[in-house]
Amino acid sequence: MTNVAATNSSAGRFAGLSIALAGVGKVALTQLLGRGSDTYVFLTSYPGLVVKLFDLECGKPDEVSYGPYLSYNVEVENFEDIKGVEELRLRVPAYYGANLDAERKFAFIAMEYLEGLNLLAWSQAAAEAGYPETWADEFRAALHETLSIVKLFHDHGIVLIDFKPDNVIRLFNGAVKFVDLGAFFTPRHSAETDKYVYAATPDYAELVIDTSNVQTGMALTQGSDIFSAGVALFELATGNSRLAIAPDSAAKMLGQPGLYRFRDSQIKDVWHAYPHLKELLPLVQTQLQERRILFAELWHLLKGFLASEVADWDSLPEEQHREMILATGTDFIADQLPPALKWLATPIARATTLRSFRLKNVVELMELISDPVAEDVEADIAHENLAFQMAPDLDPPVAFHEPLNRWEVRFNPQTEHWAINVRLAALKLRSIAPFTFLKEIFRDNEGHRFFQFAGDSDADDLDGHKLTLENLANDPAAWLGA
């Protein structure tokens, strides 16, 4: 490896560094893509490879900085967990390996470079362009796919904990992948909760609840990710992770200390256990003074405020309390959303509201995001599409979710039947995708290509081989029909 020369650039002492990577060889760090307090992400001289570097310098000759060292080990463990689960491995960057250099006090993880934009940057670009009509379906599709990946993690007992939109990359081909795997709560941690190191971004987490659960040995649940997803939806729509509150409303709440005094005492308990959060997790009183409210506090404030404003509150049944809280919160959220995205108010509210009546799983949130096809389209696909017909006969049987969403189907004017997106078909039929052959039968004036199943002798040629379902797994303009 080369010596690291100290520089004044944002890359610091790592500018010009080269690392040795098993199976690849010597790789130079070239362009700095981004950095955190103790981490750097670099493009490298090896095509398609990035390195996440952890700075372990602590100022003592025989020691390394504990926080970054712990983060490095946790992320490597999470990559190792995912490596053995194909459906998860396909949804994160390919993992090339990791190593720790104790002498020069850094560690690194090498992974695939994902070409695309994180969801937040992508949404902000659409806002600047006035939310183009063609973007709306792409946005809804990206949200649905993102949540489907969250569900996959949950299916394998993994709670993401620190889910936020800048950790979700929408590739230029339309597919979605997750990055930053450092905060997972896995089945390993469920068995030893007392050893789990909790780390989350305050705006996206209910720190009062989750830190208490960790300290008392209770496993973290899907409710944490559902909440984070709701906050993420709001940020995608507004660019902010906190809610604005009008000065007069804030002043009215500040005049009733009973609304926030107990919550502030709980926040101070979090500060005591996690001193570094004091600057990141303000008291509710401070939030009201600053007119920026964390979602974790919104619903507690609304509940207390309604109880003080509605004369017969105590005599109303609990179900009516819930309805009033949810309706008030939904309206409050909707008022801050741009017109094109006001439909997100309900999913945001249902995902972030008090845990006692929050959505129970990610599937319920996906249903609020979905845009189902018409019944006649669904019936046509069920009766005419061979992928749907063969899926139940596979071993093990495969089920497509029903109903399909509008962005997952396209009408083929030649056959006069509806086709499904090849990406969806390849994902569902991945066990047979490498040897399921295809032939193009039609191409529309927008460049979308329609395929049907074929024998190996009739299939289209591709680079000296026959075209398969697997070959088109990442093509958003390929469709599979009757």
Image (tube, rainbow, N blue to C red):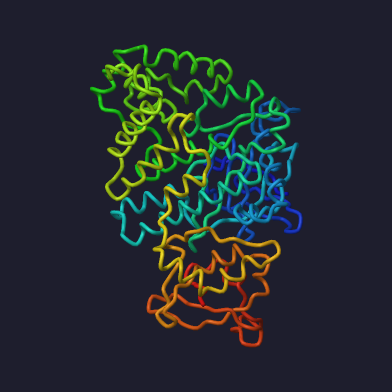
Q: Position of residue 30 (x, y in %)?
A: 58, 53
User: Residue, x 71% and y 41% (percent of image)?
Assistant: 77
- Using the rendered view, name the quadrant where residue 216 is placed: top right
Please, is residue 225 above or below residue 46 in the view? above
Residue 154, image x and y in percent? 60, 44
Residue 283 lies left or right of residue 451; in this view the side is left
User: How many discs mark residues in the rendered view?
Assistant: 0
Q: Seen from this angle, which residue lies furthest bottom? A: 457
In the figure, 473 relative to 72: above or below?
A: below
Q: Quadrant of residue 25?
A: bottom right
* Along the viewing direction, whichever of 19 and 438 lies nearer the viewer: 438
Q: Residue at x 64, y 55 (%)?
A: 87
Q: x%, y% of residue 34?
A: 52, 45
Residue appearing at x 60%, y 46% in the figure: 15
Residue located at (27% from left, 18% from top): 251
Residue extending farthest to the left is 248
Given residues 192 and 374, the one toward you in this image is: 374
Q: Nearer the viewer, residue 64 or 115?
A: 115
Q: Where's residue 382, x and y in %?
A: 51, 69
Q: Tell whether 348 sits left or right of 424.
A: left
Rendered position, 137 above or below 478? above
Image-quadrant location for residue 308: top left
- 309 left or right of 346 in image: left
The correct choice, above or below, for 437 with respect to 334 in the image is: below
